[in-house]
Image: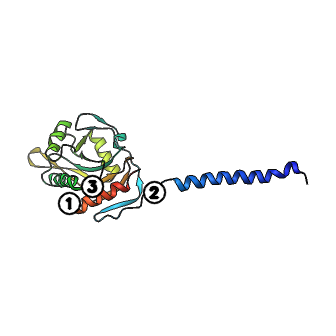
Amino acid sequence: MSTSKSWLPLAALALAGAVGGVWLARTMLAPAPAAAPTLAAGTWLPEPREFAAPALVDSRGQAFPQSAFAGHASLIFFGFTHCPDLCPTTLALLAEVMKSTSAQNLTVYLVTVDPERDTPEALRSYLAGFDPEFIGLTGKAPDIQGFTRALGAAALKVDLPGGNYSMDHSATLFLLDDSGRLRALFTPPYDRTKLAADLASAVAAARG
C-alpha cells in the first residue's frame, strides 16, 4: 500500500472533525431563543411576523420610516384625537400601565386612523394630556390604511348628521420587538395589572 496517499482519508476526517467542532462550539455558545412568555391577557405569536409599514410623520413633525421601530419595543394603538370614549379610555389606561410596568425600553405609539384631522401638532397636544412620552404617527390616508391592513387592524369612516364624521376602529394593542417585528397582540377588555405584567414579560422575551 502506498503511504503517499494513505494520509488523505485521515486528513479528511481530521478536517471534518475540526469543522464539526467549530460548528458545535458556535451552536453551544449561541444564545438560545427566548422562551415564549405566559401571558394572562395577550396572545404571543409563535414566530415573529415581518410586515411592511409606510413612511409616516411623527407628532414632532419628523419623518418616521419603518426603521424607526427598531432598537426598542413598541406598543401600537390605532385611534384618533376626536374619539369620544375608546381612545381616551385606552390611552389613560396605558399611561397608568407605563407607570407600573417593569418593561424596559418600551415606546407607546398612537397611529391615527383620521389623518384628515390629526396633524402632528394635534397629536402632540392630545397625547400630552396622557403621557408626553407617547408618540403620535400620521400620514397620507392610503398609507394609514395600508398600515392598518399590514397589522390586521380595522378602521371605518362613519358619516354623522351635519356633515361631520367619526371613525370606528379596533382597540387591539400590537407589540413589536426591537427589530420591528410583530410579536404579541392584546385585546380588550384590559386589566391594568395584568397588562402591565404581560408587557414586562413580553418585552423581555421579544429582545433580539
6 displayed left or right of 49: right
First in sequence: mark 3 or mark 1? 3
What residue would you read off at disc 1?
192
* Residue drawn at x 29%, y 46% as measured from the top left: 145
Q: Nearer the viewer, residue 170 or 99?
A: 99
Give the amino acid at mark 3.
Ser
Nearer to us in this view, 148 or 67: 67
Label 2 to label 3: alpha-carbon separation: 21 Å
| Mark-to-mark CA distance, 1 and 2 | 28 Å
Q: Position of residue 132 (x, y in %)?
A: 18, 43
- Name the mark on residue 33: 2
Residue annotated with mark 3: 102
Q: Are marks 1 and 2 in contact (CB under 8 Å)?
A: no
Where 128 falls versus 63 (above or below)? below
| Residue at 76% across, 50% down | 11
Horizontal side of residue 33 vs 175, given as left or right: right
Q: Nearer the viewer, residue 169 or 175?
A: 175
For label 2, count other residues whose C-alpha is less than 10 Å away and answer few (under 14), some (14-19) or many (20+).
few
**Residue 64 in the image, given as x and y percentages of width and height:** 31, 37
Residue found at the far top of this picture: 62
| Comparing labels 2 and 3, the label whose residue is closer to the camera | 3
**Residue plotted at (16% across, 45% down):** 81
Distance of mark 3 from mark 1, alpha carbons?
13 Å
Q: Quadrant of residue 189?
A: bottom left
